Image: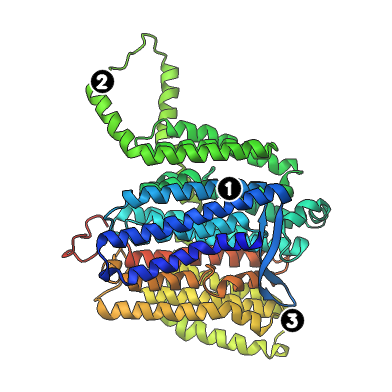
Amino acid sequence: MHLILKLYIILPLIALCSNLVIYLIKTKLTPQKYEKYISGIALSVLFIQLCLIVIATVKWSLSGNIEFNWLEILASEHGQFNIALYLDKISVVFLLLGSLLIFMIVRYSSYYMHRESNYSKFFSLLLFFDFGYSVVILAGNFGTFFIGWEFIGVSSFLLIAFYQERYLPVRNAIKIFALYRIGDISILLVIWASRYLWGEGMSFSYLALHYSIIENSVVANPVLFRVLTFGLIIAAAIKSAQLPFSNWLSRAMEGPTPSSAIFYGSLAVHLGAFILLRSEFLWYQLMFYRVIIIVIGLLTSIIATMIARVQASVKSQIAYSSIAQIGVIFIEIACGFDTLALFHIVGNACLRTYQLLISPSIVNYLIREQTYTYQPKIRTTYNSKLINKIKTSVYLLCVREFYLDGLINQIFWRPLKRWGRLFSFISIRIAIFILMPMYLICLWLYFHLNLLPLSIVQNMPLFFCSIGTIMVLKAFLERKNPISAWTMLLMNHFWVALAILYNSTISIFELLIYLNGVIIAGGIGYWALYYLKAREKSIECYQYLGHAYEYEKLSWVFLLAALGINSFPITTTFLGEDIVLSYILINQFPMIMLISFGFIVSGISSIRLYSRLFLGPHIKTYHSTSNNLA
């Protein structure tokens, strides 16, 4: 059984490597064979996955839940990081649903995406998502869960911006990635809080069976438990597009129809409900959190239903209808109807997938019906001015989507830009000739702490975190010099590392785990930026430049570098961020908030920098994709 689950997770990665080989020998194949090999490998792997999960389901029904530790990635005196797998009723339902729907979507896409220029990229991203989805569903602890969570977020961003030569898909992809990044850090805070509440790497099954541990943690650390629970609820609300984050789902429909069906109709959008089901043992006994989930689900269901009725786009209408149903699912989970919620998830996922796949045909049929069977609306003789005003007001609110987009702008984007402008005076020269020497002096003083008063030493970590936050705010608004923005992003990590060095007795080995990925990915990013600058007259990012049109391979290299300096699990920085947070004490909330905020803005800034340099309409007008929409 262990081998079956391991193979289930590894198979998409094997298929990804095979697709890469086929892409490299693309010129030696005819277009028909090229598409046949790409789609054939994906279909074969997904069919094997489907067979494996059917076998696993039969064995699970006979032997019960299965849990085991697969790998021990990191083990030290301070903590450990294990990849643990867990198969239970919830996992079985989500894996059966996911395997079946992904297989059907890939089969559909082999025809739908025919002659698409990025044919291989599309199937690779679906396999990328399949891997992340499998890890999330089979995760036995929060650390393993976070690995798959990151893969799903990145694949979602790339599929929304799949038509990268267009302005709107890229712009929407960045906005959605920003919300995803908030969800990422919420999960990271959950991992940090869980470590102090009940220890490192505690499995879901163990906590569910030993509720006394949770009761003791609620009594001993109520504030920390609230951080953990609200982090889970926020991550669930963002991923399932519940209020006040509902507006992103309709904007995610900019990608190809098959990816919209698999991501935002069936699987990814239901992961918020999966988080609540998986963590039910944490909050179900506490009425306060159940009421919050019920209120979120109820308000989302009502508002999303009204918004869906006035949408002009069929995909947006389906998106809001799905959001409304997921709101009902949230209510079912909070009320303890887990089995009903699972049935509801399966039904809603299958229905929305079907609706999205046939949506182009439905639009065509409706246009013909309106043309040939037009019927004028029958007006009633009774008209009340008050009722008409109420109807008009509600209608306008629904058309404006209850101003949810403006609410997110007011809460998040505008303050971010306002704070960034406060530090517009900081230039690359100030960073190099003032902040860098100050960093080296503070690093030297760490080895001579007897020269500093104790009160100053105690306040130094918060001061260093503040400087790191200023760096990422400056990088967020930097447009003129991308190299300067990249430098600021890297400096943030070094200031955070220095803060942790002053804050606790972290080992040099653990600190190097954190900085090693930053240094390697940062060096690759510098090379990519200087390479691009040497071949272009200007790389100022006041608009989308679309350089992936001419530098496709370079764009992928820089994307990997941008992901590498953040918490994406391709460098040791992924483990490093977890290690860094583990050395922040439970009474240091200002410090944890500054570092978390810095991680959020750093991730958004790096992806935004990549998008402005390489995505969007091409700046060179002598190409077929001229810059006419920027």
Kindly report the distance in space between the C-alpha atoms of the residues bearing marks 3 and 1.
54 Å
**Numbered circle sitting on residue 374:** 2
In the figure, residue 585 lies in which quadrant? bottom right
Q: Residue at x 23, y 25 (%)?
A: 371
> Which mark is in front, 3 or 1?
1
The answer to whether residue 575 is left or right of residue 178 is right
Cβ atoms at labels 2 and 1 below 8 Å apart: no
Q: Secondary structure at mark 1?
A: helix
Question: Which residue is denoted by mark 1 in the rendering?
Answer: 94
First in residue order: circle 3 vs circle 1: 1
Q: CA distance from mark 2 to mark 3?
A: 82 Å
**Among the 4 quarters of the image, the one containing residue 624:** bottom left
Q: Secondary structure at mark 3?
A: helix
Check the image and report above or below for 611 versus 465: above
Quarter of the image for residue 285 reads top right
Q: Is residue 252 visible to the viewer in this orientation of the structure?
A: no
In-front residue for pair 418/158:
158
Residue 59 x %, y %: 67, 51
Give the image location of residue 627, x and y in percent.
23, 60
Rendered location of residue 630, percent (x, y): 27, 57
Question: Which label lies toward us, 2 or 3?
Answer: 2
Q: Residues within 10 Å of mark 1 (few under 14, many from 20)?
A: many
Total marks in image: 3
Q: Nearer the viewer, residue 614 or 504?
A: 614
Which residue is tagged 3? 454
x, y percentage for residue 84?
67, 63
Which one is in front, 276 or 8? 8
Residue 507 in view in this figure: yes
